Image (tube, helix red, strand yellow):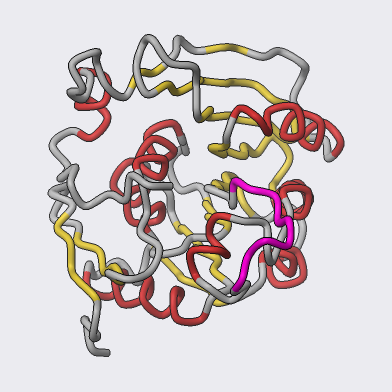
Amino acid sequence: MKNIKENESIDDLQLNGLRIIQNNDSFKFGIDAVLLSHFTKAKNNQIMMDFGTGTGILPLLLSVKTSAKKIYGLEIQKEMAEMALRSVLMNHLEEKIEIVNMDIKMAVDRFGYDFADVITCNPPYFIENGAIKNPNDAKAISRHEVLITLEGIIEQASKVLKHNGNFFMIHRPDRLVDVIYLLKKYKLEPKEIQFISPNAEKAPNLFLIRANKGGNAQLKFHKPLYVYDLEGNYTEDIYKIYKGAKMDVFDKKR
């Protein structure tokens, strides 16, 4: 399989030799994917699944950051899934990562109930409001609930997760009420939240959350994470999360 196509680039993540293929004109993953990978935890030999894997960035990062036995990346867009697969093959991770070109709404039909120990998701942040001119555009699908809603994601996660399994997600604070309501509706108990702000003087624009299937009601708030200091430089916390990974390959526009 050819590694690179027209309008694509291979970016060195400078993390355990990982490289990723990205389309220069299409949606690129952002810092949110890196933050989610750092927040996500998995035990030895667990089965992980990433809903809406896009370029495959989360499975790639989680293959280094966790001791998971197998990571499945689900992606409905055929070209995006094919590109993610080429990244997996380029990194010789085909025994650990499997990219599946499919609709998240069919996850339980494909894998069955109680399949995964951990599910991650960096979902579309915005409700589809009819203003998108091209619903087949990769950026629109990645950013807006064109093909699946937040409820559809959480419902499938609840079905595919094992009892006591964990669901990790990143989202925007204006959807926090929706997220918590839907998690509890589908028996995923919110357990940890961390808010992320551009700097110490600005309100949060993202949050990370972990929910446990069948867990007791006990929610822990982590200290806020600031991306930049007041001089516009990355904070020490962000540098620790990246751990030397190349920081200029990430799309900051999401």
Question: x%, y% of residue 108?
Answer: 75, 63
102 vs 135, nearest the viewer: 135
97 vs 8, nearest the viewer: 8
Residue 227 to residue 6: above or below: above
Residue 253 to residue 129: above or below: above
When asked about the image quadrant of residue 209, the answer is top right
Q: Is residue 126 magenta?
A: yes
Residue 240 to residue 88: above or below: above
120 vs 207, nearest the viewer: 207
Instruction: Name the side, left or right, on which 53 lies relative to 149.
Output: left
Q: Is residue 220 magenta?
A: no
Q: Residue furthest bottom?
A: 1
Q: Residue at x 62, y 37 (%)?
A: 166
Instruction: Name the side, left or right, on which 235 lies relative to 172.
Output: left
When asked about the image quadrant of residue 32, the answer is top left
Question: x%, y% of residue 130?
Answer: 73, 62
Q: Residue at x 69, y 34 (%)?
A: 164
Q: How many marks?
A: 0
Q: Residue at x 54, y 46 (%)?
A: 120
Question: x%, y% of residue 60?
Answer: 33, 56
Which residues fall within the magenta stretch?
A: 125-133
**In which quadrant is the N terminus drawn?**
bottom left
Instruction: Name the side, left or right, on which 71 lies relative to 213.
Output: left
Q: Residue at x 41, y 80 (%)?
A: 82
What main secondary structure does the magenta stretch of the protein show? loop
Question: x%, y% of residue 10?
Answer: 18, 68
